[in-house]
Image (cartoon, rainbow, N blue to C red):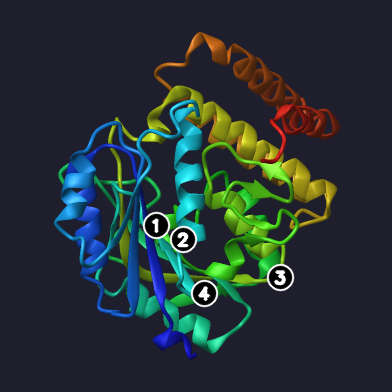
């Protein structure tokens, strides 16, 4: 089947926040590309999302988990919910849509064309808007706005895309809402399962997007980045990434991805590459830690590990920094 006729699955993992969910769902339903299925997996603590979903029951597939993940930390619940949706999906392509984000009407129709043209493409991404609780576009220091000239794009091969993702000090591609990916590329052959939580056996705790992209790039598939603005990322204080412990986990996981890539000669092929990656991570850490309002007492061990990593990077001790990263990798829970 040609890509422009392929079924696309839009996956919406939800957890409370019904006021945002309705807007996200409407943005999925308003796609100009019509061969889609919309799956909603709700892990909310009440039935407000379920009541909204019932209004669209003939146009979506809805799953309610009745608090089945309550023993999981907040940062892990989204990943479990997302993996459930991946297993239930039937489309050749996947567009994840987080319940507080939006996708613009032409997102899928514009992105899917690139998969038709080139099998080397693994991830198609675009510029995105940043919006507040009320949907207003807000200023952003990354300089991403709908003012950029539409229609332009760049292709990055797998090695360049992976190296860029590990060295620029943050996720320049964007969240999973921002991209379109083949369903088969969410399948981790070594794990024999669908997952957005592992990169080469390294367990991720809260990002899901970065390990997914790195895993795809490690298989030799590259990145298309479009200048069109095709989605919106909502910033608000009640999102998971505002949680202090989640931010610490994200930093440690990013550090682990850098160390694992260097050890396996993926993307980072020299000490210069490694040094650049640690420098970018150091900048990211400074930004995130300065914006972390609260960290629970039980996260003291995470802070201690981060302080050791920051100190070793400041002293340019690459070997020690890698050892600290693998200390984190080896302390993670085993693969499910």
| Dot placed on the residue nearer the N-terminal end, 1 or 2 | 2
Q: CA distance from mark 3 to mark 2?
A: 27 Å
In this rendering, the answer to whether 329 lies above or below 100 is: above
Q: CA distance from mark 4 to mark 3?
A: 17 Å
Task: Name the foreground residue: 270 vs 109.
Answer: 109
Label 2 CA crowd tier, 10 Å (few <14, some 14–19, many 20+) = some
Query: In the rendering, which numbered label is found on residue 154?
Result: 4
135 with respect to 160 (left or right): left
Determine which residue is flagged by label 1: 177
Q: Position of residue 304 (x, y in %)?
A: 65, 15
Task: Name the foreground residue: 36 vs 228.
Answer: 36
Do labels 1 and 2 touch, CB within 8 Å? no
Local SS, label 1 = helix
Decide if residue 137 is in sight here.
no
Decide if residue 47 is in sight here.
yes
| Dot placed on the residue nearer the N-terminal end, 1 or 3 | 1
Local SS, label 4 = strand
The residue at 17%/43% (across/down) is 19
Q: CA distance from mark 4 to mark 1?
A: 19 Å
Determine which residue is flagged by label 3: 220
The residue at 21%/70% (across/down) is 30
313 with respect to 143 (left or right): right
Q: How many marks?
A: 4
Query: In the rendering, which numbered label is found on residue 251?
Result: none
């Amino acid at each position: 089947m040609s890509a422009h006729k392929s079924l696309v699955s839009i996956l919406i993992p939800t957890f409370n926040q019904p006021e945002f969910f309705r807007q996200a769902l409407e943005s999925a339903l308003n796609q100009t590309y019509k061969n889609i299925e919309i799956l909603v997996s709700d892990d909310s603590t009440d039935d407000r999302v379920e009541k909204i979903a019932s209004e669209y029951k003939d146009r979506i597939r809805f799953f309610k988990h009745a608090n089945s993940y309550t023993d999981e930390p907040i940062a892990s619940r989204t990943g479990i919910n997302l993996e459930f949706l991946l297993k239930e999906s039937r489309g050749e392509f996947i567009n994840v849509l987080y319940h507080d984000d939006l996708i613009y009407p032409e997102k899928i129709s514009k992105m899917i064309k690139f998969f038709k043209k080139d099998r080397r493409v693994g991830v198609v991404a675009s510029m995105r808007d940043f919006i507040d609780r009320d949907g207003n576009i807000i200023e952003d220091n990354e300089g991403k706005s709908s003012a950029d000239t539409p229609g332009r794009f760049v292709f990055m091969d797998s090695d360049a895309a992976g190296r860029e993702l590990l060295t620029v000090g943050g996720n320049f591609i964007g969240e999973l809402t921002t991209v379109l990916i083949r369903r088969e590329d969410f399948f981790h052959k070594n794990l024999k399962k669908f997952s957005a939580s592992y990169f080469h056996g390294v367990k991720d705790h809260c990002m899901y997007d970065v390990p997914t992209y790195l895993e795809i790039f490690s298989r030799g598939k590259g990145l298309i980045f479009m200048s069109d603005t095709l989605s919106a990322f909502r910033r608000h204080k009640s999102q998971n990434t505002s949680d202090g412990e989640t931010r610490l986990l994200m930093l440690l996981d990013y550090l682990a991805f850098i160390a694992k890539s260097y050890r396996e000669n993926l993307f980072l092929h020299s000490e210069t590459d490694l040094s650049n990656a640690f420098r970018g991570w150091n900048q990211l850490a400074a930004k995130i830690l300065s914006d972390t309002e609260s960290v629970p007492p039980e996260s003291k061990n995470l802070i201690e590990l981060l302080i050791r990593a920051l100190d070793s990077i400041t002293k340019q001790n690459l070997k020690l920094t890698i050892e600290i990263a693998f200390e984190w990798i080896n302390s993670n829970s085993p693969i499910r």
